[in-house]
Image (cartoon, rainbow, N blue to C red):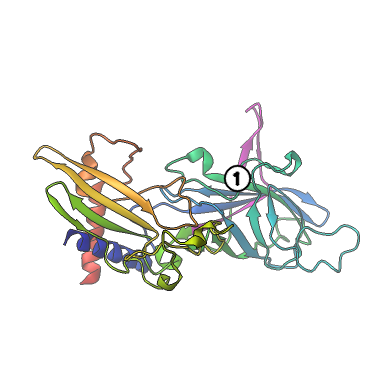
Amino acid sequence: MRTYLITLVGLLFVLFSYAAAYDPLDPNGNITIKWDVMSWTPDGYVAVVTMNNFQMYRHIMSPGWTLGWTWAKKEVIWTMIGAQATEQGDCSKFKGNIPHCCKKTPTVVDMLPGVPYNQQFTNCCKGGVLASWGQDPQSSVSAFQVSVGQAGTTNKTVKLPKNFTLLGPGPGYTCSPAKIVPPTKFFTADLRRKTQALMTWNVTCTYSQFVAQKHPKCCVSLSTFYNETITSCPSCACGCENKHKCIKSDSKLLSMVGVNTPRKDNAPLLQCTQHMCPVRIHWHVKLNYKEYWRVKITLTNFNYRVNYTQWTLVAQHPNLNNVTQVFSFDYKPLVPYQSISKFFEILHQYKS
């Protein structure tokens, strides 16, 4: 019964988040893309593009982020430092100096670690991996430099790119239109002088589990010290579309080269289970006294293509506000439980 309630709450949470485009567990969470025009060139400008992951608990893991947009005019990318376009496109009309990318809709990815020094830029070259601000602020930033041609050479002639898309990896993020904001200000190395960008615009991308996939990414099972019965994850808790593609744990296919390589579309390769979830979270009540209770949480990864090196588990429970001791991992409350209660109150009204 308790597992059913947990599953039901999770389902209602997903539906409510989609309807209101709001995550009560991370109300201010987003990825902000800042585009700073630093200098003008004969036919365009040089800009620094910075991505800040302001989400409290959601990382972008390997194979990393992919950023795309549509040029407003006939812009081309002459050069890039710290990132690269995945396709050059048709640059046949150019003679001599060939642009890095001529596509109307370029797709850009981060460079891998270990690239030559002259191709590196500050906060680049992490394979697109972007930590959450709540867990690792120093690793929550990614940046690259881009030289844009055929773009205009003044604030009035430069047109903002359109239709920004962010994959991280796989779908889930929806990006706002670019918006001109006050130019970013910078301090010089000696902190005695302040400079500023010639022009700045921002794009805000927010995450929706419903956009990412229609089924949950994990399920919850339950056991207790006073009962030998285990309440398993429900059958097909994460959907059974992949049931004919799953692999048994003893299959010889697992020895094939490249079978564990992550895919850019985030397509899973699951171990065959009754629940068919990429991750199972097992909640075992070890002690249950009047003064306190103790729980052991076990996470099991059934996705052969994803290695959760920087995993974060988000759980909501009224007693987690009074946690006294945590073993094996770090614990941090996201919001006061009153906010969660407010969420359920709003959800009840919404359902009514």
Question: Which of the two residues, 122 or 159, is positioned nearer the viewer here?
Answer: 122
- Residue indicated by mark 1: 126
Residue lying farthest to the left in this orientation: 290
Label 1 amino acid? Lys
Q: Is residue 196 magenta?
A: yes
Residue 166 in percent (x, y) is at 55, 60
Is 247 situated left or right of 41 in this image? left
Residue 97 in percent (x, y) is at 87, 57
Residue 247: quarter of image: bottom left
- Quadrant the C terminus occupies: bottom left
SS at circle 1: loop
Is 194 situated left or right of 326 in this image? right
Question: Which of the two residues, 100 or 291, is positioned nearer the viewer here?
Answer: 291
Residue 71: quarter of image: bottom right
Q: Is residue 191 magenta?
A: yes
Residue lying farthest to the right in this orientation: 96
Could one spot residue 316 in this view of the protein? no
Q: What is the crowding at mark 1: few (fewer than 14 residues within 10 Å), some, or many (at least 20)?
A: some
- In the displayed structure, 74 sits above or below 38; it is below
Image label count:
1
Residue 314 in percent (x, y) is at 33, 50
Residue 24 in percent (x, y) is at 33, 55
Could one spot residue 159 in this view of the protein? yes
Residue drawn at point x = 36 percent, y = 70 percent: 239
Question: Which of the two residues, 70 or 241, is positioned nearer the viewer here?
Answer: 241
Residue 197: quarter of image: top right
Residue drawn at point x = 47 percent, y = 40 percent: 136
Residue drawn at point x = 52 percent, y = 44 percent: 140
- Quadrant the N terminus occupies: bottom left
The part of the chain drawn in magenta is 182-205
